[in-house]
Structures are given as C-alpha cells and as structure tokens.
Amino acid sequence: MSEPEPVEIKQEREDLCGNQDEEQPNVFEFCGNSFMQHNELASHMIPQADEKPFSCLTCGRGFNKSNDLARHIRTHTGEKPYSCEVCGKSLTDSSHLIKHMRTHTPEKPFPCLTCGKGFTAQSDLTVHMRTHTGEKPFTCLVCGKGFIQKTTLSYHMRTHTGEKPFPCDLCDKSFIQSSDLARHLRTHTGEKPYSCDLCDKSFRQSSDLARHIRTHTGEKPFSCQICGKGFTKQNNLTVHMRIHTGEKPYSCEACGESFTVKFSLTKHKCKNANQEVLRQ
C-alpha cells in the first residue's frame, strides 16, 4: 500500500493545475475580452465580413489584409518596386508584373469568340466580353450609372464625393486615380512612350496607340447590336446608339433644344451668341 501524498505537495499541485471541475476563461490578449469556450474565442479572433482593420492614413480606405494596404499605399507614394527585365517598366504589384510579362510573348491563350481578340488573362477576357454584351454589373447607388469593372465604379464614386487623392507636384491639379496623374505628368515632360510600329507616330497613352493602330488594321471592335455598324471607339458606338434610342442628353439652357453630342450643343450656343452680337 502506497504512502499517502503529503498535504503540502497535494496543495501545491492543485494550486498549479487548478480545480479541474472549474471552467477557466480564455482571454484574448489583444483586446482583453474573456470567453468560456474555445470556439467563442476563435470566432472573436476572426474579423467580421465587413470589418477592415487596416486603414490608409492618406485617404482613409480600409482593407482586410495588411498586404492589400501595402499595395494600396504605393498608389499614393508612386513606389513601383517590381521591374520588367525586358523593357524596364516598373509596376506596383508582383501580379501586375506577371501579367505585363505576357505582353512580351505572343502567347494570348484567352481569345474572344466574338471578335477574335486575344488576352493574356481570363479576367481580361471576361471584362472585354462585356463590351460586346453591354453588361454593366457594377452600379452606382448615387446616380444609377453602370460600369463594366468594379474599379471603374470606385473611381466614379469620387466624382460624387469630390475626392482627388493624387495631386500633381508641378501644378495645382489633382486627380481621381493614379493613372490620370501619370498621363497628366506627360503634359509637363512631353513624354510619349507608346510608339506605333507601322508609322512614326507616338502617343502619351496606350489607349490612344490602340485606337491609332485600328486606322492601319481597319479593325472596328465595337458593334451596334441593332444595325450591326462597327466602330473603332466605344464612345463612337455610344453616340451612335442615340440614333436608335432618340436620346439627346445635351440641352441648351437658353432655348431648351437638345442634342445627341456635346459638340452640337457647343456649336448651337456659338451660333446663338453670334446672332445676338449682330442684333446689337
């Protein structure tokens, strides 16, 4: 028969281990909240779906992850730590660099079945298809305008809030998005980094080069679904659609006459102004 445990040792063991029948609270060291169950503590530690604990000190935008915030901050600082070894172009994010590298290879594994245009990423093809279908799944809750991409909606919202977080250091202008600032800076520097391989013209924007190349190829990727007429630019298709819909969004404040394009309204106002001068 074993000797009974000394009272002093028994007491010390109970002090260290605690009473096994008594529930001990689980304390989250970051906020001090206590929970009786481990699963309650685990749930508390997982951020809620709408919680964005990482905030940008420049514009106040919130993020779920610290690395998302780090990427966002580069849009303010202009830092582009990822450089292309082929052409030297710098980018803010490693995923953007991977996508850019595909522009140096002929491989475009995601073709559009409507117009044949190829894309380096499935996401680019998905967005492109909306130019054919007219789908605009992202809607502004303020004015109801629809957009093809979520990022475009985000930029549009700043037209309502007046936020322009990207200022030019060379003049007093500010811009809604970093790409607008980059384009604007070229008006100061005179830089035209996008050159046509078929002629000697250069452009400040890649989109201007793309439109220019269509003058060589004859490509008209924007087609009217009503009459089939093709256009080289999306905005030309938008104006053309007003012929079918009868929409005239530009109105003269003086006489109330409406026009399908802004240029026609400007021309109308000039004509009225000249007539007013002749009457005097």
Image (tube, rainbow, N blue to C red):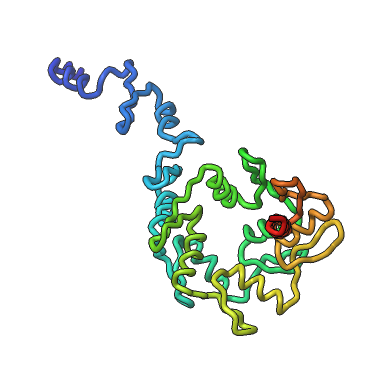
Name the image quarter holding the N terminus: top left
Residue 64 vertical placement versus 210 (above, below)? above
* Horizontal relation, residue 276 to residue 14: left or right: right
Picture coordinates of residue 260 (x, y %)? 76, 54
Picture coordinates of residue 30 (x, y %)? 31, 33
Residue 219 vertical placement versus 11 (above, below)? below
* Horizontal relation, residue 165 to residue 141: left or right: left
Q: Which residue is drawn at 79% across and 66% down?
A: 230
Residue 29 vertical placement versus 224 (above, below)? above
Residue 130 falls in image quadrant:
bottom right
The tally of labels here is 0
Q: Which residue is drawn at 67% across and 76% down?
A: 213
Q: Which residue is drawn at 65% across and 43% down?
A: 139
Q: Which of 68 and 31 is in front in this view?
A: 68
Picture coordinates of residue 196 (x, y %)? 61, 80
Q: Which residue is drawn at 42% across and 32% down?
A: 42
* Horizontal relation, residue 8 to residue 20: left or right: left
